[in-house]
Amino acid sequence: MSISTTAHSVVAPTPLSKRIAGTVVVLYALISIIPLLWIFATSLKTPPDSISYPPKIIFTPSIEGYCNLFTTRTRQTPEYIAALPPAGSICDEATRQRNMVIAGPSNFLPRFVNSLVIAFGSTFCAVFLGTLSAYGFSRFKVPLADDLLFFILSTRMMPPIAVAIPIYLMYRELGLSDTALGMILLYTAVNVSLAVWLLKGFIDEIPREYEEAAMIDGYTRLQAFWKVVLPQATTGIAATAIFCLIFAWNEYAFAALLTSGTAQTAPPFIPTIIGEGGQDWPAVAAGTTIFLVPILVFTILLRKQLLRGITFGAVRK
């Protein structure tokens, strides 16, 4: 008589748990992506369709929202419009159908460029300073290191809006209000604490023996850091850069308080897009859709490093 036994690891998931986990992940992904799909669909609606009730799921696509996002328009009489030469573009034709003409470009593109400069500039500065600081805390005996690390972390314990008024007064005195430099410095100061704590954990996982062997071969400390430590910390740097960029890219409170024109970013500008008779929701949705593209592309390009960075050091030999 033979007795068959089935061995099962307590670590490996069972087929049932895999199916349940897969179902939960799919449901979560669908629930998370529905608002994004609705925003994209709204950007392709006409203004009347965007505010119709019940909401229209099936509609005729239109690029009017994107045209309104990138242009400013003025209303004219039918006689004036009839006297104009034929429309030279799709946006011009869509505008004339509503008895309006394009008066010039809007301020969205400069605001979008401000977001790119400020977000990526502050992310580079935060990651650069965070990498150097994390390496110092990880490799050298820093007096009161634990206290300093706690102080650095404590800067993230309060909501940014709690210090908005003091920062506004300080920036007004220093002449940094409504400047790209001021916003880069501010976002760098906010993100550097996160960068230090994340990168210190990654650098702690890199054995010191690698650097010691490099310095025995004649490398200086800086050369060992550049050629040995930095390449192995690439995954952690990529993960840290994504988190820092997400904060700087989406930040609204400081941008709304400290900028109004020259250095204004896209988040406080997009909600102010006004159309004829009220909020121009297709243009707002179009601006939001375009605003999502850079952060989405940046995350996709670094997705492998992000996944490896999150799981770095999870398994020890």
Image (spheres, rainbow, N blue to C red):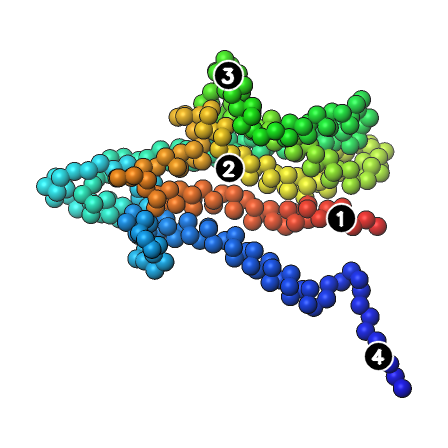
> Which residue occupies the extreme right position in the image?
1
Element under disc 1: loop
Residue at 84% over, 76% down? 5
Dot 2 corresponds to which residue? Answer: 250
**Closer to the observer: label 2 or label 3?**
3
Q: Amino acid at mark 3?
A: Leu
> Which residue occupies the extreme front position in the image?
54
Percent x, y of residue 179:
47, 23
* Quarter location, residue 268: top left
Q: CA distance from mark 1 to mark 2?
A: 30 Å
Residue at 81% over, 36% down? 211
Q: Name the foreground residue: 204 vs 231.
A: 204
Q: CA distance from mark 3 to mark 4?
A: 77 Å
Q: Amino acid at mark 1?
A: Ala
The answer to whether mark 2 and mark 3 are in CB contact below 8 A is no
Percent x, y of residue 46:
29, 50
Vertically, is 44 above or below 164? Answer: below
Instruction: Give neighbour class at mark 3: few <14, some 14-19, many 20+ (Cα, 10 Å).
Output: few
Percent x, y of residue 106:
32, 35
Q: CA distance from mark 1 to mark 4?
A: 36 Å
Work out whether mark 1 precedes mark 2 in sequence or the reverse, and give the earlier one.
Answer: 2
Q: Is residue 82 left or right of residue 163?
A: left
Instruction: Give neighbour class at mark 2: few <14, some 14-19, many 20+ (Cα, 10 Å).
Output: some
Dot 1 corresponds to which residue? Answer: 314
Dot 3 corresponds to which residue? Answer: 169
Count the marks: how many?
Answer: 4
Q: Amino acid at mark 2?
A: Asn
Q: Quadrant of the N terminus?
A: bottom right
The answer to whether mark 1 and mark 3 are in CB contact below 8 A is no
